[in-house]
Image: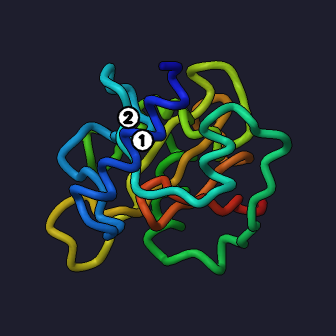
Amino acid sequence: MNRASAFSCIVALSVIFGGCGKQGPQNATEASGASASSAPVQPAQSASESAAASGAQGTVALVTVTKAQLPAEAAETLRLIKAGGPFPFSDDGVLFRNTAGLLPKHPRGYYHTYTVRTPGATDRGQRRIVCGGPRKQIGECYYTDDYYASFKRIAE
């Protein structure tokens, strides 16, 4: 069984046994992309996302949002990224592997992920900003509010 088939089976089983909610594995270390060494587990995917995960990815087409369209907490996270920290969570700035291929392809180590605080949440929540390139640069950043299931490119 190749990796893509195994990944599809894992996704299907997680939907069957875990329900169809978008909570995802909150106790795993950034299960869909951070530097965990085990195989990633992700929420259910659409057909186009499954194609991307299996390597059938062409050009990634993402919705673009302006900084003004993002929650205020995302603007604060972008400010912290540009300043180089300090970040509120120890997992901020860790490697994001882009294993599902939802972001443009780059070499390993290109993307890093940062928490966007969620008011009222008792944990890190599902909101993140993933930035590519050198640290302290926010030129190529993406916002997700569903724990890496989808992304929006943040316009300059």
Model colouring: rainbow
Q: Quadrant of residue 126?
A: bottom left
The picture places residue 109, in percent across and down from the top left corner, at 56, 21
Give the answer, above or below, for where 22 lies relative to 103: below
Q: Which residue is rendered at x = 40% and y = 34% of the image? A: 34
Number of numbered tags placed on the structure image: 2
The picture places residue 149, in percent across and down from the top left corner, at 50, 57
Residue type at the position of mark 2: Pro
Residue type at the position of mark 1: Ser
Give the answer, above or below, for where 84 lies relative to 1: below
Q: Local crowd at mark 2 within 10 Å, few (<14), some, or many (≥20)?
A: many
Q: Quadrant of residue 93?
A: top left
For this view, does 27 lie left or right of residue 73? left
Callouts 1 and 2 close, C-beta under 8 Å: yes
- Per the rendering, the mark at residue 40 is 2
Q: Mark 1 — residue? A: 32
Label 2 secondary element: loop
Q: Which residue is rendered at x = 77% and y = 63% of the image? A: 155
- Give whichever of 130, 19 is nearer the camera: 19
For this view, does 150 lie left or right of residue 57? left
Q: Local crowd at mark 1 within 10 Å, few (<14), some, or many (≥20)?
A: many
- Give whichever of 12, 113 is nearer the camera: 12
- Per the rendering, the mark at residue 118 is none
Q: Quadrant of residue 10?
A: top left
Point out the residue furthest to the right here: 59
Q: Which residue is rendered at x = 66% and y = 63% of the image? A: 152
Q: Which quarter of the image is occupied by the C terminus?
A: bottom right
The picture places residue 43, in percent across and down from the top left corner, at 40, 55
**Mark 1 or mark 2, earlier in chain:** 1
Q: Which residue is rendered at x = 41% and y = 39% of the image? A: 9
Label 1 secondary element: loop
Distance Cα–Cα, label 1 vs label 2: 5 Å
